Amino acid sequence: MVTTQRKVPVFHAHGCLGCGRRYADTCRSPLANGRCNTCRLGHPPSVTDLNREPRACCKEDSKLVTDNETLNRYNLGGPGPWWLCRTCSRTQPRNPKEHA
């Protein structure tokens, strides 16, 4: 089995330290989570952010991402953990079974 290095591109996803939602940005520290615009600035979540929220299928079909290849494919930053829905392919920084 070939092991890949974790590569976080310029545009990547994080899990907010305030509300726990997934958010995307282009920060210079892709391996550390921060706070989303809603928590930092009080802006309401954007339509894009709302469309990334877990769906009903995420509660049933999400699995913990454990390999760098998947983290790289979905541009997932931060220290993790991340969950991936096997139905809709949404990624979440917290377990949808517990937080949906």
Image (tube, grey):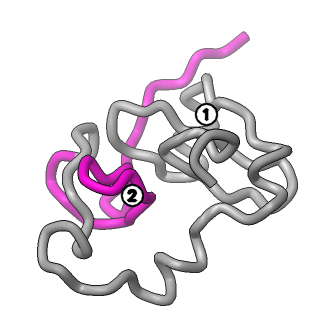
Q: Residue at (75%, 42%) from the top-left corner?
A: 62
Residue 97: x %, y % from top left = 69, 41
Position of residue 10 measured from the top left corner of the image (x, y, whole percent): 31, 60
Task: Give me the residue at 22% from left, 39% from top.
Answer: 32
- Residue at 21% over, 58% down: 35
Whether residue 44 is situated above or below residue 24 in the rendered picture: below
Which is more toward the observer, 97 or 67? 97
Q: How many marks?
A: 2
Q: In which quarter of the image is residue 53?
A: bottom right
- In the image: residue 49, left or right of residue 44: right
The quarter in which the C terminus is drawn is bottom right
- Say whether residue 24 is left or right of residue 73: left
Magenta residues? 1-29
Q: Secondary structure of the magenta portion, mostly?
A: loop
Reading the image, the residue beneath label 1 is: 69
Q: In this view, does 79 lie to the left or right of 26?
A: right
Residue at (67% x, 59% y) in the render: 90
Q: Where is residue 93 in the image (x, y as percent from the top left)?
A: 48, 45
